[in-house]
Amino acid sequence: MCQIASFSLLQSRKGSISSDVRNFNNIEMRALIKFFSLPGKAPKEIHTILTETLGEHLPLYATTKNWVTQYKHGDFSTCPCPG
């Protein structure tokens, strides 16, 4: 239910956030991808959700896939820096 609510919120805010999407930083994008990967969504599905919601201002599919793989291996950090 949480996934549906969060997706609905992102979709409903699409028009109002589209100009602000360029201000998403790396940590915020990682947090979104982490949120959608926790219930077991596939990287392709996550990337599709982000594409529909955020348009072109998002990481490449390869980046999304890499981050999901890291989360599956136990690295739940949203900070891209080591340590």
Image: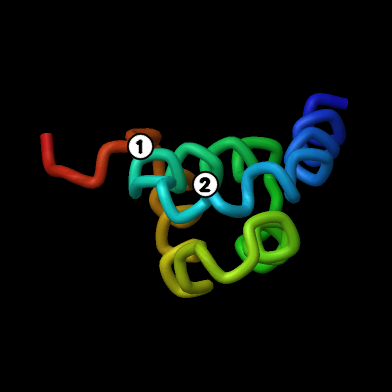
Please indicate whether residue 80 sits to the left or right of residue 18 in the image: left
Amino acid type of the residue that numbered disc 2 sits on in the rendered structure: Asp
Q: Which badge, 2 or 1, comes first in the chain's sequence?
A: 2
Judge by depth and name the residue closer to the eye, 44 or 58: 58
Q: Quadrant of residue 38?
A: top right
At horizontal 80% and vertical 46% (from top left) the residue drawn is 11
Please indicate whether residue 72 sits to the left or right of residue 16 in the image: left
- The residue lying furthest to the top in this view is 2
The residue tagged 1 is 78
Q: How far across and down, in percent of the image, does residue 10 sit?
A: 73, 41
Question: Is 59 located above or below residue 21 in the figure?
Answer: below
At horizontal 56% and vertical 52% (from top left) the residue drawn is 19
Q: Nearer the viewer, mark 2 or mark 1?
A: 2
Q: Disc number at residue 24? A: none
Q: How far across and down, in percent of the image, does residue 45 sit?
A: 72, 62
Q: In the rendered picture of this protein, how many numbered marks are placed on residues?
A: 2
At horizontal 43% and vertical 46% (from top left) the residue drawn is 24
Q: How far across and down, in percent of the image, does residue 8 sit?
A: 85, 38
The residue tagged 2 is 20
Please indicate whether residue 58 sits to the left or right of residue 66 in the image: right
At horizontal 61% and vertical 45% (from top left) the residue drawn is 37
Q: Callout 2: few (<14), some (14-19), or many (20+) C-alpha neighbours within 10 Å?
A: few
Q: How far across and down, in percent of the image, does residue 25 sit?
A: 35, 46
**Cα separation between marks 2 and 1:** 20 Å
- The residue lying furthest to the left in this view is 83
Which element is circle 2 on?
Answer: loop
Please identify the quadrant where the C terminus is shown: top left
Question: Is 47 located above or below residue 15 in the figure?
Answer: below
Judge by depth and name the residue closer to the eye, 50 or 64: 50
Please identify the quadrant where the N terminus is shown: top right
Which element is circle 1 on?
Answer: loop
